[in-house]
Image (cartoon, rainbow, N blue to C red):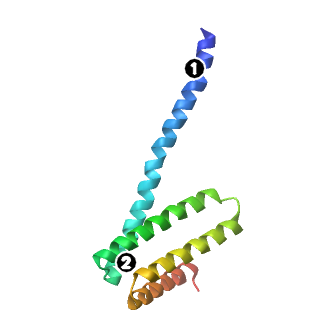
Amino acid sequence: MKVFYLAFIPLFLLIATKGFAQNNSPVNVSNYISKAQAETNRLKASLNLTDVQYQKVLEINKDYFKKLADIRTSDADNPALRRQKLDELNKKREDDLKRTLIDWQFTKYKNQMDSIRHQMTGH
C-alpha cells in the first residue's frame, strides 16, 4: 500500500503542476490584451483614429505587449540582451505605427512618447 502512495505523489504533483500552468496562461494572455486595448483606446482618443486605424493599432499593440512580456520573463538574467531586444521591439512598433498613422498623428504620438519618457527618466 505504501508503494501505491509513493507512486501516487509524483503523479499528483505532475497533474497539479500542469493545472497551474494552464491556469496561468489565460491570465497572461488577458493581461497583454487588456494592456493593448487600454493603450489603443488612449491613442484613439488622443489621435482621433479611424475604425480601420484602430484595428491596425490594436493588432500592433497586442503583438508589442505580448513580445514585451516574453522579453521580460525570458531575458531577466541578461540585462544587455534584454535591453537590445526591447530597443528592437520598440523600433518595430514605431515603424508599424508610422505606416498606419498619417503624418500629424505620428508626430503627435512621438511627442507624447517623448513626454512620457521625459517624465519617467527626469531628463
Residue type, numbered disc 2:
Leu
Coordinates of residue 118 in the picture (x, y in percent): 54, 84
Residue, x 43% and y 57% (percent of image)?
31
The reply to whether dot 1 and dot 2 touch (C-beta < 8 Å) is no
Total numbered badges shown on the rendered structure? 2
Per the image, the residue denoted by label 2 is: 43
Examine the rendered structure and indicate whether residue 32 appears above or below residue 113. Answer: above
Q: Position of residue 70 (x, y in %)?
A: 56, 59
Whichever of labels 1 and 2 marks the residue nearer the N terminus, that label is 1
Q: What is the secondary structure assignment of the residue under circle 2?
A: helix
What residue is at 60 percent from the left and 73 percent from the top? 88
Give how far across and how far down residue 112 sits, in percent. 45, 84
On the image, which quarter does residue 80 sit in? bottom right
Q: Which residue is mark 1?
A: 8
SS for dot 1: helix
Q: Dot 1 surroundings within 10 Å: few (below 14), some, or many (20 or more)?
A: few
Q: Which label was assigned to residue 45?
A: none
Above or below, comparing residue 70 to residue 90 in the picture:
above
Picture coordinates of residue 65, whole percent (x, y): 48, 65
Q: Relative to residue 69, is residue 49 drawn left or right?
A: left
Q: Is residue 31 above or below residue 21?
A: below
| 102 displayed left or right of 9 | left
Q: Height in image: 104 above or below 12?
A: below
Q: Amino acid at mark 1?
A: Phe
The quarter of the image holding the C terminus is bottom right
Q: Residue at x 50, y 79 (%)?
A: 94
Q: Quadrant of the N terminus?
A: top right
